Amino acid sequence: MHLACTNLDSYRGFMSVHLHIRDLPDEIHQLLQQRAAARGLSLRQYALEVLREHCQQPTLEEWLDGLRQLTPVTNSTSPAEAIQEAREAEEVALVDVRSRS
């Protein structure tokens, strides 16, 4: 027993962190259980999957920082002209399809 206690600090590096959520509303708990069951997962597995997916998405600030690093695009055509050109091209394509039938 003494040996196990002396190596506790090195053992902690291999342990998973336990997460407890207090005051979880019943309706959220039930919804999580239903979704976990629908996927054939335990509540723990499903919650871990949801947290992993959430952490893979950038935060709003991270996303905005990424946008700020992009090179601005300049267009020679105004948005109104681009829309008009797209509408005209679509109209020509529809006329072409109708003439084939």
Image (cartoon, helix red, strand yellow):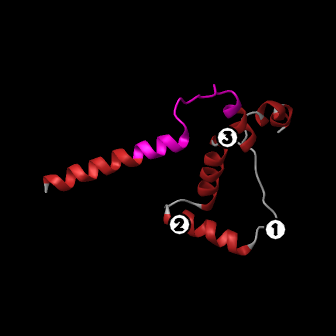
Q: Residue furthest bottom?
A: 27
Q: Which residue is mark 3?
A: 58
Report crowding for label 3: few under 14, some 14 to 19, many 20 or more residues within 10 A (C-alpha).
few
Looking at the picture, tell me which residue is in the foreground, 85 or 8.
85
Q: Secondary structure at mark 1?
A: loop
Please provide the residue range marked out in magenta. Answer: 66-86
Locate residue 58 relative to residue 7 in the image: left or right.
left
> For residue 35, which numbered disc appears in the image?
none
Report crowding for label 2: few under 14, some 14 to 19, many 20 or more residues within 10 A (C-alpha).
few
Q: Which residue is mark 2?
A: 37
Question: At 49% across and 41% down in the image, what residue appears?
Answer: 81
Q: Are marks 3 and 2 in contact (CB under 8 Å)?
A: no
Q: Earlier in the sequence, mark 1 or mark 3?
A: 1
Quadrant of residue 5 in the image?
top right
Q: Which residue is mark 1?
A: 23
The answer to whether residue 97 is magenta is no
